[in-house]
Image: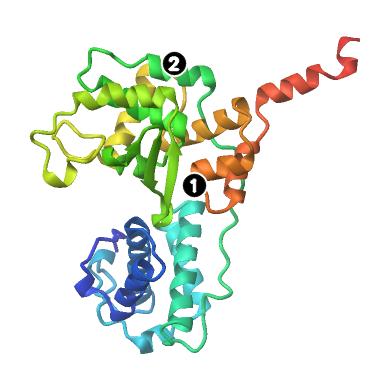
Amino acid sequence: MKFDIGIIENSSLPPCLNDFLTYLSTIKGKSQNTVNAYKVDIIMFFRFLKYYKGLCKVDIELKEIDISDIDNKFLRSIRLSDLYAFISFTDKYRKNGTYARARKVATLKSFFKYLNGKAKILDENPAQELESPKISKRHPIYLTLNESKTLLTSLDESNKNYKRDFCILTLFLNCGLRVSELCSINIDKIKEDTLTIIGKGNKERTVYLNRACLKAIADYIPMRNTEKVPIEDKNALFLTNKNTRISVRAIELLVKKHVKHSGIEKNNCTPHKLRHTAATLMYKHGNVDIRSLQMILGHENISTTQIYTHVDDETLRDAVKSNPLGDL
């Protein structure tokens, strides 16, 4: 059996899943990206269960398993042990890491809470005691101040996309935006030194632009050729060479290319690591308090922001040097 998940249309989904996805978007106000992530996880879960319970052919591919016949009787037969079997499957066969498995646990807990508490399909919630894999707290990987400057000065000014790419990197390193937030920036949302964006969970927040950001935007905007841009993308700040709004994948490749070209030795430097960089530099060099940093980054819980309070190697080195016994 091959374990390609595949994607299916909403018309082929069981009613309980369609109803849950509608609930997430209309009542809970979840973003489309979040809804799609829940959808993929639950589709995989249902397909796995049908295979696990012997309700389909043994040699069938996962993406070919029909789940449109999932009904209330099937839902009521699901036990906690089935949920753990699925999480084990994602670990051993899908090679999901801790974070990916934790997300699937969160998806299942939310889905079964809905089936039990809102839809009233289940009398008991089998996911109530489902535990999430323990995630070890790690220091965020980020660029140092000197590495950040090196990255910005290493761009090829003769490249036709220089001002666009420089602007993108400048916003990442100064504002700590998520890559999806940067892709969604619209020109009409820039007012003087403020930028209004829709962040995680469809929550609107204001991003304040410093002089470097304002100059980078002002230098780039005249370079945008909007004559061939489709109507739906004319308001997009960042455009591709094909005159469409830039995608998350395009920015990921762009960041990877420029970091490699700069000579900075950081493995797999992603847009999210540039977000970490902005947050770390603000906290370390800008004396930004943790509450302000939480607002800047758009974190719902301050516990997420607290990873930036780590003590870096230079601070540790200075602490050791300050020991009064160090000069004996």
Q: Nearer the viewer, residue 317 or 214?
A: 214
Compared with 120, 83 (above or below) is: above
Amino acid under disc 1: Gly
Compared with 318, 89 (above or below) is: below
Residue 246 is drawn in which quadrant?
top left
Please provide percent x and percent y for residue 137. Answer: 61, 46
Determine the residue located farthest toward the top in the rendered image.
Answer: 328
On screen, residue 222 versus residue 83, left or right, reads left
User: What's the residue at 21%, 34% (across, down)?
Assistant: 239
On screen, residue 250 versus residue 131, left or right, reads left
Residue 322 is drawn in which quadrant?
top right
Please provide percent x and percent y for residue 22. Answer: 32, 72
Amino acid under disc 2: Thr
Tell me the SS state at disc 1: loop
Looking at the rendered image, the disc whose residue lies closer to the viewer, 1 or 2, is 1
Residue 21: give its label. Answer: none
Q: Nearer the viewer, residue 75 or 280?
A: 280
Residue, disc 1: 298
Please provide percent x and percent y for residue 199. Answer: 40, 49
Asked if residue 91 shows in the view, the reply is yes
User: What's the residue at 61%, 33% (across, down)?
Assistant: 288
Please provide percent x and percent y for residue 45. Answer: 38, 69
Q: Earlier in the sequence, mark 1 or mark 2?
A: 2
Image quadrant containing the N terminus: bottom left
- CA separation, marks 1 and 2? 27 Å
Q: Nearer the viewer, residue 99 or 318?
A: 318
Compared with 203, 223 (above or below) is: above
Mark 1 Cα shell of 10 Å, populated few (<14), some (14-19), many (≥20):
many
User: What's the residue at 44%, 82% (across, down)?
Assistant: 118
On screen, residue 101 versus residue 280, left or right, reads left
